[in-house]
Structure formats: structure tokens, C-alpha cells
Image (cartoon, rainbow, N blue to C red):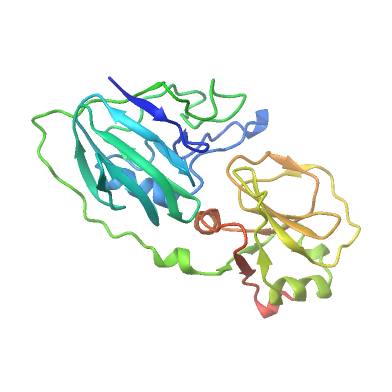
Amino acid sequence: MGIKVLRPGLSTSVQDMGRYGYAAYGIPESGAMDKYTAGMGNILVGNPQNLAVLEITRIGPKLQFSTHHQIVISGLEVDAYLNDKKVEVQEVYDVNKGTILDIQRVVKGNFAYLAINDGFQTEKILNSQSMYQGITTKEVISEGEDLPVSSLDENISDSYSTISFDEQRYKKHSLRFFPGSEFYLLSREQKVKLAQESFTINPDSGRMAFLFQETIPPKEESILTTAVLPGTVQLTPDGHLIVLMRDAQVTGGYPRILQIPERQIDVLAQKRPGESLRFSIAQSEI
């Protein structure tokens, strides 16, 4: 049995925790942009953290259920309704045949996640269900399709999790980092600029990379194309900063000046264009 997609929303896709072990073949990691929030939805509905969920980007889908399920929408704040009844985030809901879930928009942050009992049962390619153009047959869900899921045993007892969702992490406006492999190439002037200035997220940011509007003084440095991964901060020849995200390429030729830890990628993913961030750089590093 499946879930009928009545409206696909904006770039709604199936994601899990990522496609690992294929970087040598040029295949990105992919996976949920905010893995903490995606994993939280799975935990609350009684799944392992790595099962496939629906990633909702800004404008959500409208879905109709064909049988009994338990679902959770995880996120910061979402405008969503089950048969016109308001849905709260981080709450488990029973849905029955014919129930319509209308996820109208993500109110806070960029991404929210729909978790369902036993996860979404889409095709697994290279050990992952994460949708990515050129790897999976589709990169987003489409109107009219049926998303494969497992029905919930009618005799199962309700045992909802009550784990706490750490929303405070998303209110921070500074990012911790490790010095990148080419951090040593930065001049003192560039390091001071990194430490003292705020950087505004560019509207062109997305699953491949987050871009920033401000620049630091450029410096003509080139490196051989080498390995990069999500969280790598690159410096372009014109002084712009690029933070690679989940769908990023696996090699790059710009200096890797910083590396953001995994949990900080989750935080960055939920920052909207126009929001400003600072890089938390220790005085000893300048």
C-alpha cells in the first residue's frame, strides 16, 4: 500500500542518513540536510534513526494515506494539518485510510521531515534511498505517485517516545569549526576578517552548498583538485566563502580553509537566506 501524492510541494524528496563509501566514484554523500531533526522523527515514531523520511523544503506536500500508519513531523515549526486539524511538530499521530495530511509550509528553518512507521520503502541504490539526480530515477517526488510504505499492524500497542528535541542548538548564530587543510594559506588580515565579521546567507544556497554574500580580502592561491566533504568551507578567488552541504561534489580546487563539524551542518541547514552567522575562531588561531 502507498501514500498518494496530491501535491508534491517544493523539492520534497526521500532522504535517509546518506550514501557512504562511493566518493571514489564521484558520488556525493547526500542524505537529510538536517540529520539530527530527521533522526529525531524516526526515533519518535519508533524507527531506527537511519530509515528513509520525506524531506520537506519550505513549501510542503499534500498526501493521502491508504491504510493505518503512525507519523511524526519533525522540525522547528511547520504549518500542517491532518483533515484540517493542526499538527504539532515532534508529536506522534495515528492516521487511517483516507486521511489527508496537508503540510502547507515550513514556518521556521528550511527543512522539516515526515517520518512514518518502518520508513518509506522506496528503492535503495548503492545502500541508500536518498534521492539524487543521476543516481536515483527521481530527485523529488511528483504529483500522482504512490509512495510505498508499510501498513501498521492494527494490533500493535501504542508506545510513543518522549525524547526531548533540542531546539536551542538552532538559535545559535555562530558556527564552530576546525582549521581546514589550507587554513595556513590565510593571511592575518583574512583571519581577522573571518573572526570579526558576520556573513549573510545568499539566496542561491541549497543542498549542494551554502553561499555567503560578504567577502574576505582575496588572495591568489591555487591548489590541486583534492578531496572535500560536507562541512568543508572553501575560499573562492574573489573572496567568497562556500560551505559544502550534503549533495556537494567530492573534489574541489578552492582552498579548504575551514571544516564545520557534522552537528553544525545541521544548524547551518536551517538558516534562511538573509540570516547572518559568524565563524567562532579562537584568538590563538589568528
**As rendered, which of 184 and 202 lies closer to the eye?**
202
Q: Judge left or right: residue 59 versus residue 119.
A: right
Q: Position of residue 18 (x, y in %)?
A: 50, 37
Q: Is residue 193 above or below residue 252?
A: below
Quarter of the rendering containing residue 116: top left
Closer to us: 198 or 191? 198
| Residue 31 locus on image (x, y percent) | 50, 39
| Residue at the right extreme, as displayed | 220
- At 69% from the left edge and 45% from the top edge, which residue is drawn? 228
Left of 221 or right of it: where is 74? left
Is any atom of residue 74 visible in this view? no
Q: Answer with left or right where residue 152 lies relative to residue 250.
A: left
Q: Is residue 9 visible?
A: yes
Q: Quadrant of residue 164?
A: bottom left
Say which of 98 and 235 sits in front.
98
- The x, y position of residue 105, in whole percent, is 43, 47
Q: From the viewer's perspective, tell me whether residue 174 is left or right of residue 286.
A: left
Q: Quadrant of the N terminus?
A: top left
The quarter of the picture where residue 216 lies is: bottom right
| Total labels drawn | 0
Which image quadrant: the C terminus?
Answer: bottom right
Question: Where's residue 162, x and y in %?
Answer: 21, 55
Q: Among all residues in the image, which is located at the extreme bottom? A: 283
Residue drawn 68% across the image and 80% down it: 283
Point 73% across, 40% down: residue: 251
Residue at image position (66%, 28%) is: 25
